[in-house]
Amino acid sequence: MNSPRSLYPLVRIWLDETPTTFMHAFFEKLAYEWIVEIVNPYPLPLMENKEYVMYLSFEMDDGTTHSSLAIQSYTMEQGNEFTVYRFFMYPHL
């Protein structure tokens, strides 16, 4: 039986210390993995001197913040109106 996902809304995001705007963003905490999903981020998570960002910081809507989480991998899905990035991290819990 599948349980519903626990998604927590985000109010602020920094990709490699760069403030990033977005349409929607959510945080999901799984047993061994954290996922941040960002819809239509700006600027795009591609930096000039490297392939993609290395660290992600965010603030949840309840005021909880997490800083400088190392990004292990990411996926990107592009549609007509939306681009969705999912960043995967394995913080020391």
Image (cartoon, rainbow, N blue to C red):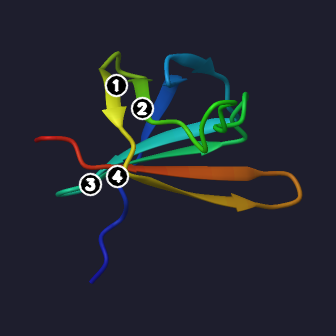
Q: Nearer the viewer, mark 2 or mark 4?
A: 2
Pinpoint residue 16: horizontal percent, then vertical percent.
50, 24
In this rendering, is residue 48 above or below 46? above
Q: Which residue is drawn at the image coordinates 43% and 31% (left, top)?
A: 56
Determine which residue is flagged by label 4.
6
Q: Nearer the viewer, mark 3 or mark 1?
A: 1
Kindly report the distance in space between the C-alpha atoms of the residues bearing marks 2 and 4: 23 Å
Kindly check if marks 3 and 4 are in contact, taking CB atoms under 8 A apart as contact: no
Crowd rating for badge 3 (residues with CA inside 10 Å; few <14, some 14–19, many 20+): some
Q: Residue furthest bottom?
A: 1
Kindly report the distance in space between the C-alpha atoms of the residues bearing marks 1 and 2: 5 Å
Q: Which residue is drawn at the image coordinates 37% and 50% (left, top)?
A: 72
**Which of marks 1 and 4 precedes in the sequence?**
4
Q: Nearer the viewer, residue 93 or 46?
A: 46
Crowd rating for badge 4 (residues with CA inside 10 Å; few <14, some 14–19, many 20+): few
**Which of marks 2 and 1 precedes in the sequence?**
2
Determine which residue is flagged by label 2.
55
Q: Nearer the viewer, mark 4 or mark 1?
A: 1
Determine which residue is flagged by label 3.
33
Going by the numbered disc 4, the residue's amino acid type is Ser
Determine which residue is flagged by label 1.
68
Going by the numbered disc 3, the residue's amino acid type is Glu
Kindly report the distance in space between the C-alpha atoms of the residues bearing marks 4 and 1: 22 Å
**Which of marks 3 and 2 precedes in the sequence?**
3
Residue 61, by quadrant, is top left
Q: Quadrant of the C terminus?
A: top left
Residue 43, by quadrant, is top right
Kindly check if marks 1 and 2 are in contact, taking CB atoms under 8 A apart as contact: yes
Kindly check if marks 2 and 4 are in contact, taking CB atoms under 8 A apart as contact: no
**Which of marks 4 and 3 precedes in the sequence?**
4
Pinpoint residue 51: horizontal percent, then vertical percent.
61, 44
Going by the numbered disc 2, the residue's amino acid type is Tyr
